[in-house]
Image (spheres, rainbow, N blue to C red):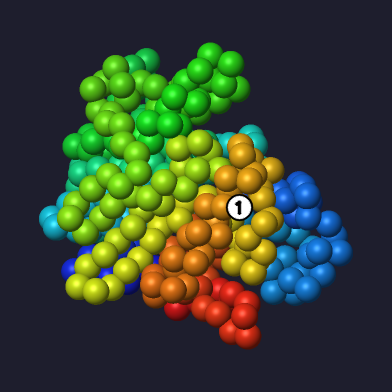
């Protein structure tokens, strides 16, 4: 398992927040039939079930420590089999204290990407990363804070909205420079404001893909969309564009929802088809 790698002068490390219970693959990819899964079943499914991982990545660039997404939060989480989150402990094991984090960058605002933003154990929310600025995609903020959407997104109400009153939040979008080596790329579809994080240093490249990819099967089948995708045509387009970029420009790809032994790899082409090649 690759849990740390370098891209030129930049260090990227992996942390696992939690492993939720496996699910029926048709619940996760509702438009994909059992027959469609047959060629991939032995490689991707576990006893016929789809196992998602809640992994995330930190980046060290130009003296800054950047956390990309913050997992589900402490829990226990009833929607995830009452599992608990371990992000803070995982960071500590890598030598990163909460106060060491300079920026938290959100690829999007789903529950499993914002959960450790704030300590909600007291009457007044407090940042779990007390010295960090929290970067929020503007288009996701506009989408999720509409009253009709916010009522169905308690994680945004609890773990994102208070950041504004605390004065800790900055909005961003496509092409935002986090450092001179770390930028963002708009990849709408899973959510309206979804972004990936691009790293470029000394001629080497990497991307942290958020939820553009949930499974390595999507490298071969980019038209397979998750049930949670808000706009499936945009999701497919973003995924195809990103896979083409990864393949043709030799990116290392970090995919936190992939299995731990394959969550960092490359997109390679053989005989006219793309494949996932773990590092």
- What is the x, y in percent for residue 261? 52, 72
Q: Secondary structure at mark 1?
A: helix
Give above or below for 224 relative to 205. Answer: above
The image shows residue 129 at horizontal and vertical percentages of: 27, 38
- Residue 159 or residue 213, whichever sits in front: 213
Closer to the camera in the image, 230 or 258 = 230
Q: Picture coordinates of residue 166 (x, y %)?
A: 26, 21
Q: Position of residue 235 (x, y in %)?
A: 58, 48
Residue at 19% x, 37% y is 131
The answer to whether any part of residue 96 appears in the image is: no
User: In the image, what residue occupies the spot 57% across and 52% down?
Assistant: 237
Residue 162 seen from this side: yes
Q: Is residue 47 left or right of residue 72?
A: right
Residue at image position (63%, 85%) is 271
Q: Quadrant of residue 220?
A: bottom right
Task: Tell me the quarter of the image containing the C terminus.
Answer: bottom left
Indicate whether 173 appears above or below 246.
above
Vertical relation: 27 (above or below) 172? below
Q: Name the residue beneath numbered marker 1.
A: 236
**Residue located at (55% from left, 80% from top):** 269
């Amino acid at each position: 398992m690759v849990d740390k790698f370098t891209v030129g002068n930049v260090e990227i490390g992996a942390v696992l927040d939690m492993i939720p219970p496996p699910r029926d693959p048709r619940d996760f990819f509702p438009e994909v039939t059992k027959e469609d899964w047959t060629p991939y079943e032995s490689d991707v499914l576990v006893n016929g079930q789809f196992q998602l991982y809640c992994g995330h990545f930190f980046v060290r660039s130009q003296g800054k420590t950047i956390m990309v997404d913050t997992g589900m939060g402490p829990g226990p989480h009833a929607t995830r089999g009452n599992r608990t989150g371990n992000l803070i402990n995982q960071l500590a094991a890598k030598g990163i204290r909460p106060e060491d984090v300079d920026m938290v960058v959100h690829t999007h605002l789903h529950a499993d990407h914002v959960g450790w933003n704030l300590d909600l154990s007291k009457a007044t929310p407090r940042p779990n990363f007390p010295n960090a600025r929290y970067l929020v995609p503007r288009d996701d903020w506009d989408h999720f804070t509409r009253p009709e959407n916010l009522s169905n997104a308690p994680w945004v109400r609890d773990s994102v909205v208070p950041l504004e009153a605390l004065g800790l939040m900055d909005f961003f979008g496509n092409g935002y420079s986090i450092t001179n080596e770390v930028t963002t790329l708009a990849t709408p579809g899973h959510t309206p404001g979804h972004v990936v994080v691009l790293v470029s240093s000394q001629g080497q490249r990497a991307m942290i893909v958020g939820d553009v990819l949930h499974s390595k099967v999507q490298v071969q089948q980019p038209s397979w969309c998750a049930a949670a995708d808000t706009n499936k045509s945009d999701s497919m387009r973003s995924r195809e564009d990103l896979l083409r970029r990864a393949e043709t420009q030799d990116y290392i790809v970090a995919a936190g929802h992939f299995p731990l032994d394959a969550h960092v790899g490359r997109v390679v082409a053989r005989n006219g088809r793309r494949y996932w090649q773990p590092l």
